[in-house]
Amino acid sequence: MSQLWSEINKVVNVLNPAYITSGASAVKCTDVVNLENYKKCTFLLTFGAAADHVAAVTVNAYSANTTGGSAVAFRYRTQETSDVQSAATAAATFNTTTGSAGATYIVEVDAPTVAAVATDYDHAYMVITNSTGHITARYASCVAVLSEPRYPQAILQTAID
């Protein structure tokens, strides 16, 4: 008997739909996820339409369930006007595009990469920072899918502290 998708993937709502306000100083962080029991984390970041809104997206690694730590390398794909995804791109940050209603960014982080940043680092969170000169606010939401559990079981362990 094969496992259910929900037995091998843990879904965590890390950013309820939120209005990302205008101005370069506006920063929105997702909730922090604990990768201790998982090998991979995929953030699915979705934006509503805005005529003039660009945000820089980074992922930070840390040793605890608080914001802080350091930026971590990841791979990302875009899916903007259809269900066709872009090629995976390695990055430490990227900028979103303007105007695409329902634009989705798929950001993939490996637990070993998080752990390599510093001793005891096993938590990750996404940071969304508005770019200078882009003034229109925009809705955003994000879920994290933790996969490849280190100890598979029917009920996966929590990923939030």
Image (cartoon, grey):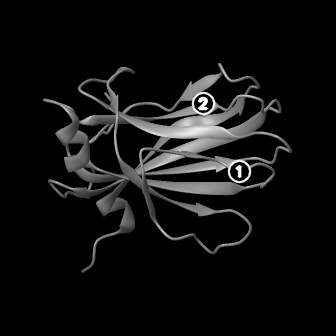
> In which image quadrant can residue 161 be found?
top left
Q: Secondary structure at mark 1?
A: loop
Tell me how many marks there are: 2
Q: CA distance from mark 2 to mark 1?
A: 13 Å
Q: Secondary structure at mark 2?
A: strand
The amino acid type of the residue labelled 2 equals Thr
User: What residue is rendered at 30% in x and 62% in y?
Assistant: 8
Residue pointed to by mark 1: 97
Give neighbour class at mark 2: few <14, some 14-19, many 20+ (Cα, 10 Å). many
User: What residue is rendered at 57% in x and 69% in y?
Assistant: 86
Residue pointed to by mark 2: 129
User: What residue is rendered at 41% in x and 35% in y?
Assistant: 125
Against 155, residue 6 (above or below) is below
Mark 2 or mark 1, which has the lower sequence index? 1
Return the x and y of residue 35 as percentages of the image width and height.
26, 42
Give neighbour class at mark 1: few <14, some 14-19, many 20+ (Cα, 10 Å). some
